[in-house]
Image (tube, coloured by chain):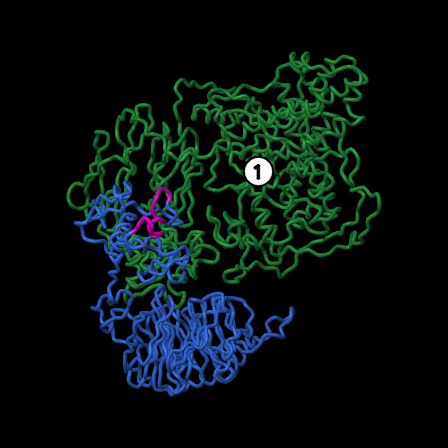
Amino acid sequence: MRTRSFSLAVALAWTVVGGFWATADRTPDTALPPKPLLPEIKSLILEPSQLRLDDARDARRVLVLGQRSDGGVVDLTGEAQFKATGQSLSIDAEGYISGLQAGDTTVSVTADGQTVTLPVQVMGGALRPVGFVRDIEPLMGRVGCNQGTCHGSAKGKNGFKLSLRGYDPDYDYQALVNDLSGRRFNRVNVDDSLMLLKATAEVPHEGRQAIRPGSRYHALLRQWIAEGATSEDPSARATNITILPSKVEIDLPGRQQQLLVIASYRDGTTRDVTREAILSSNNDEIAQVRNGLVTAMRRGEMAVLVRYEGIYASREVSIMGDRTGFEFAGMPEYNFIDRHINAKLQRMKINPSEVCTDAEFIRRVSLDLTGQPPTSSEVRAFLAETGESRAKRDRLIDRLIGSPAYSDFWANKFADLLQCNSENLGRKGVVVFRNWIRQQLADNRPYDQFVRDLLLAKGSTFESPAGNYLRALRDPGKMTEDVSQTFLGVRFNCNKCHDHPFERWTQTQYYEFGAYFAQVAFKQGTLGRDHLIRAGATYAEDQVSEAVVYQNYDGGEMRHPKNDKVMAARPPYGQAREVAAGEDRRVALAEWLTSRGNPYFARSTANRFWSYFFGRGIIDPVDDIRAGNPPSNPELLSALTEELVKNGFDLQRMMRSICQSRTYQLSIVPNQWNSDDLINFSHASPRRLSAEQMLDAVAVATGHRPQFKDMPAGLRAVEAPDGMVGGNEFLTLFGRPKRQSACECERSSNVTLAHALNLINGPTLGDCVTSSDNHLARLIASEPDDRKVIEEVYLSCLSRPPTEKESTGIKLGEGAKRLEGAQDLAWALLNSPAFLFNR
Amino acid sequence: MSRLLHRPLIALVVSGLLGINLIADEAPVSWFKEVNPIFKRSCNGCHNPNKLKGEVDTSTFAGLLKPGKHGPNFIAGQPDKSLLFQQVSGKEPEMPKEGDALTAGEAALIARWIQEGAHDDTPTNAYSTRVTELPVYATPPVISAMAFSPDGRYLAISGYHEVFLLDATNLVLVSRLLGEAPRIESVAFSPDSKSLAVSAGAPARFGEIQVWDVASGKESQAWKMGGDSLFGVSWSPDGSRLAFGGVDKSVRVLRVADGHEMLKFDNHGDWVFRTAWVAGGNRLLSASRDRAIKLIDVTSGQFIDDINKLLEPVLSMARHPKEEWAAYGGAEGGLRIYKAKENQERTDANNDVNQVRQFERQPGAVHTVAFSPDGSLLAAGGASAEVPVYKTSDGSRVATLKGHGGAVFAVAFSPSGDRILTGGFDGLVRVYDPSNGRLTAIFTPIRLDPTAGVVGK
């Protein structure tokens, strides 16, 4: 019986779910789309519009852009013809222009039948010696010597190790020149240098022929050895890179756009480093990048990430695709959020979905603000409320924000982030810590003050529960990594061992930041040292875990692993106050971290909270903010950030703005113009209920609440203080985190067959639906009208009344079968996507 | 190679007409000039004598003749039955495992070479690096090794393809010991000062041990072995044997008289850089990048123990002239002295029982260490341009030798102990007074000729 009615529901549920995920998981298509025909070109634009060549090794390209009649541009660089006037320039097959003799000259550039003139100034500068930092390191990066699978791996390769992707030029110089007493170079007979013989595969080289004999790189490396294989000060590294063109908007798939990367140096010079820079696509399905050439694959937005000598930049690319017939129909703007969303949608030619229904809204906003769906009576009352829908919704938002259920739900969320688990904190520790967190949310404590308390706490972790945060992290390394990830949204894990391979963070910065925590210490407290387990003690009464008092003491230092040097406390960016003698270093840290001017603190917070309401951050993942992970709507993120700072880090106010926006209230039903949009918030996206939401929603729907081991009866799942709480495999299965990581990804929200099977056969749902003390039993006993029973079940499970068809089409059965029928119905609804997802 | 592109080779492969020699009127394919370069680019990285993936060596014709794990590499005249061709051709060629497949032209060239009989046209001296004339130096060669003869008469300094033998008193060049190997790794005089042993090699090609008669400046013995340089040659106290390490992770002992290999010790996990004899020639120390200094019983060839705690790759080592001690310098700047004996008494609480002394941490890798003749001083050269000289007895620094134009790779005390010489990256030899660190002379072992340009074959 159960299986029959359930199988129908499950088929429906998992078809929809499967379809949803299949869209996101499409495998990349490597074949390039055909080149579309050139549109009419009005004129040619050169970028840059003129060139200056500093010396004979200075080779540069220009981009040739065709101005379309609709205002856009088409890249013609690949097909353009370059012709030098006079004898003072040479232009190679790739279009690189270099100077032969000093003076002013021109190049005529022809494309699509039109010709423009490029002024070129050749400076007669003396050829500078080949520099190890300026020339050789980028070359090794480009040919791949120092990549993670070759000599850049932690153990090197075949006895030769370089720093990963060349982050440490001093180390690389030692390795290349001094290692093994100068084995790898030979000044006396340059061509007998092992580094040349290996790179050209003249002697066996597992990395094969990385450098072609006679190539530009071969000549450069050879020249460097001939000039003495000398070192170069690391300050010769590039200081900045610029990507050209400044804006990339491609009209159609198949169209290409060449990018140029220009590096600038401390001495004021610049260089075209397109050939040495590493360019990659953050989404190969939308556009591919090869040798600086972007090929549009399909409509969408992506970013080209550019890495050059420890500098990271990205260029966002949008591909419009064929939008014939599109007319913008923006949504009404309820607040500033909608203004920024509308602007982006208009630019990308997307129309937003319709507004969601009141029933959809009350379920969505209740789940998002309180972690549980509304009860049937709450739904009834809300639907019956008269007046304008928007005002009604605003009133509901006000009721929910700050309610006890709100505090419980957000306390649970923060307890995840702050790693509240009994393995690290003991059983009493998690209770006091969770209660303290909940109090901050109930009081709507400004977020900056909340974070300062966490960073600065001292004394007994029982009496000052905020101290449990650093207690849970334990060591300065984990504090460095988790504080940066949780409060700044940046990941510092990589730069513990080497400079960050995808971001500007250096290994030195890791240890400088870590120095702020180096003197945080812990010792055994005097409270609750006895270890007693009283039979029958409930969780909250169980006070047996050890108390840990922690405090600072002098002596702890952070040392750089490379040279064992004691690191001074210093923030990874911006300026922090010097730590005074004898002062707790964390004071200066907390001031810097939570200051209004800290560009990452408020921004990452605004972005993180946005993601809690949309299932996706404006920057996503929310805790991996870096150049290669740009925001989908930077103006919106700035506005949210400003709002948060302006209002003194008032979290409730920010959540209110988000929930009151039309954007938040959009339907999940897409339209012709937004069905492929996954990043611009033009429609709501179904989000699977979290483990605790799901369990609590089952309790709301059935009126039966599962009991947790060692916990008071009637406790909701979001109220459980401990990430380690046992006795309920349902929560574990549905992805409740153990709270041992700062990563949002510790909580899983995926959908698997194990989930489906548990809902079909598992005891949790079954017990709730069939329990004799649940709503259904009472309802069947007291309500003779089947239609009213069905309506109540729909309202309880899905927060909406049944449709006419549902109401009349479902037959509960007679007599004793009637309860079974009602149970079957609840069962089926609880297995439908309408229940399992917040939509 | 570009000439080949015009040949109808692609058609040859595709049409499967491999049995017929369509292009008989063209010159036959050269193994050495045409096929070998393809293997260099695409195959030899894994199929060389040091790696021998699949027991196949494609780096020389001699290597190709030896069958691999799956049989003979080729059957002359039958490309379609030859692994060499099968593996690199077809729609999805088996080889190369990584990187781009061979072009159709390259595969066809290999096929045609086999078809034509797979003839060897390797020139006679193709794999020799021997030079016929003395090198002329426009710039000083890096100094990787330096040693005084025990009798104080001679000073040996590494060059390119050669060792410079100087009069130790007036530092005048006496003879140039020109050998085959281009890269000199270590030099050591025999206990009677009559012979000089040299460990050397051509990196990634071969290793060589040379023995020179000091008086005549003639090479009395030379043995080429292995696929890469040999390091850290040392004489047994009786002058009858030589020990040295290698890239192949082995420690070997040769009988000087005839080159007979008396011992090959394979217990190290990485390259072996130094050797030293202890216990009157009954035991041997070997220092390796695997972090260990191993104690070896020379008679049985048995491993006895690691004498040290394994802290960092060991790059350099020197035996104390009187005590059964060895000083070592490490890749992470460690400088320590250890007793050359078993390490069996180590416990969890003290697992470094043999350590005699630990010196201040050096600012970078330590490439060379040397004791003064009486053992009272220890000097260490490395990545830093300064060479500290320490008192062995208490680890205090007595002098700092300054002025180097780069890293230091070789340090040698004169037998009388009144001078200490350093050499390294910049190719200059500096002479210091070890008692106060005063620089007394700078010279190059050979006169430079700025017009010489590049030397070589």
Q: Which residue is mark 1?
A: A605
Total residue callouts: 1
> Quick check: is B447 in the magenta stretch?
no
**SS label for mark 1:** helix
Q: Which residues are magenta?
A: B78-92
Task: State which chain disc 1 sits on.
Answer: A
State the image coordinates of residue B302 (x, y, percent, origin top left): 53, 75
Q: Is residue A586 left or right of residue B78?
A: right
Which residue is painted at 34% across and 27% down in the image?
A72
Q: Is residue A188 left or right of residue A745?
A: left
Quadrant of the image for the C terminus of chain A?
Answer: top right
Q: Looking at the image, which is closer to me, B417 or A598?
A: B417
Chain the render paints green: A
Q: Looking at the rendering, which quadrant does residue A377 occupy?
A: top right
Q: Is residue B23 left or right of residue B217?
A: left
When the figure is inspected, residue A379 is found, relative to residue A31, above or below; the finding is above
When the figure is inspected, residue B415 is found, relative to residue A166, above or below; the finding is below
State the image coordinates of residue B245 (x, y, percent, origin top left): 43, 72
Q: Looking at the rendering, which quadrant does residue B367 occupy?
A: bottom left
Using the rendered image of the protein, determine whether residue A560 is visible from the camera's viewpoint: yes
State the image coordinates of residue A746 (x, y, percent, origin top left): 61, 41
When the figure is inspected, residue A425 is found, relative to residue A736, above or below; the finding is below
**Chain B colour in the picture:** blue
When the figure is inspected, residue B262 is found, relative to residue A394, above or below; the finding is below
> What amino acid is labelled 1 in the image?
Thr
Q: Looking at the image, which is closer to me, A426 or B238?
A: B238
Q: Residues within 10 Å of mark 1 (few under 14, many from 20)?
A: many
State the image coordinates of residue A416 (x, y, percent, origin top left): 65, 41
Q: Looking at the rendering, which quadrant does residue B68 occupy?
A: bottom left
